[in-house]
Amino acid sequence: MVNQTIHNMKQPELGKRISEMRKAKGLTQEELVELCNLNVRTIQRIEAGEVTPRSYTIKTLFEALGAQWENIEKGTATSYPKSIVTWLYVGFGAGLVYFCLSYFEISMEIEWMEGSYVNTLNFGLVKAGVLITFSLFIFGLIKMTSAFPNKILQIALWVMLLANALWAGVDFLALNMSSLDLKDYYEVKISTFGLAYAFMGVGFLSYKKLWSNIPQVIGALGLVSGVLMFTVVGALFALIPLTLFELGELGLLVWSINTIGRTSSPDSTIGAELQS
């Protein structure tokens, strides 16, 4: 039972757990003070394992950190499903592969539109690889939003997933139909992805107190790259912030894997309740 775990938990384990919960929320000790009306010195001593707080103080801290005390008392706090962690790993691995393949795809598209010889089979295989790996990458991020709720980002990710599937289908048609050429719709395609990336940027910006201010930095990069892509003229300049944006997404997946793995351990059901 979780309530027995709480009462049997001894220092410094209790202090370490509270510190982990606070950091997972992106709170400083001073910000936690404002939420629970304790003084900074008390929280510092508790987290350092120097004192064992009373039950009332523990309850106050947990509730200030967003844990539902009633659920903890009843032992109904739940950890994350293992499938979420699996999908995060899949998303991260697929994202790495996509990150490499996307540059081959871009260079092949440029050569194709300039009239240079590009092997159709190889071009098609690269595009198929990008479609699959990018889709898995985005789906991993969608699973992340089920662990760290963000409705705006979740919708934006689904929009990106659909846009990617739509334009991949058009690209495959263009590779196999002489009546349709990449140049005929390329600007519209770039603008569409620009809107989707900008939407994702707004989604990341809407995260509050998650992993310090990293999601806001990622969101700003996504918004800037999306706006530049939407103008088409600035698409080339968008490659730098876009690269940093996607590296940031990969970093956020790693952070999510570490955070969920820690809060989903057998004796960390309290931390899991905090994030739900």
Image: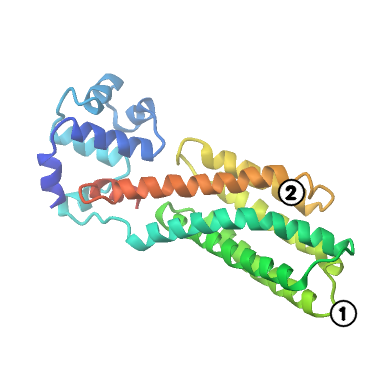
| Residue 178 in sight from this viewpoint | yes
Residue under circle 1? 179
Spatial distance from mark 1 to mark 2, Cα to Cα? Answer: 31 Å
Name the residue located 53 percent from the left edge and 59 percent from the top edge.
94
Counting from the top left corner in percent of width and height, residue 78 is at 26, 56
Label 1 or label 2, whichever lies nearer to me, is 1
Q: Is 125 displayed left or right of 84 in the figure?
A: right
Name the residue located 55 percent from the left edge and 48 percent from the top edge.
249
Residue 44 occupies quadrant: top left
Name the residue located 56 percent from the left edge and 53 percent from the top edge.
96
Question: Which amino acid, by three-letter code, is at mark 2?
Answer: Val
Q: Residues within 10 Å of mark 1 (few under 14, many from 20)?
A: few
**Helix, strand or loop at mark 2:** helix
Q: Is 177 displayed left or right of 46 in the figure?
A: right
Question: Which amino acid, by three-letter code, is at mark 1?
Answer: Ser
Residue under circle 2? 227
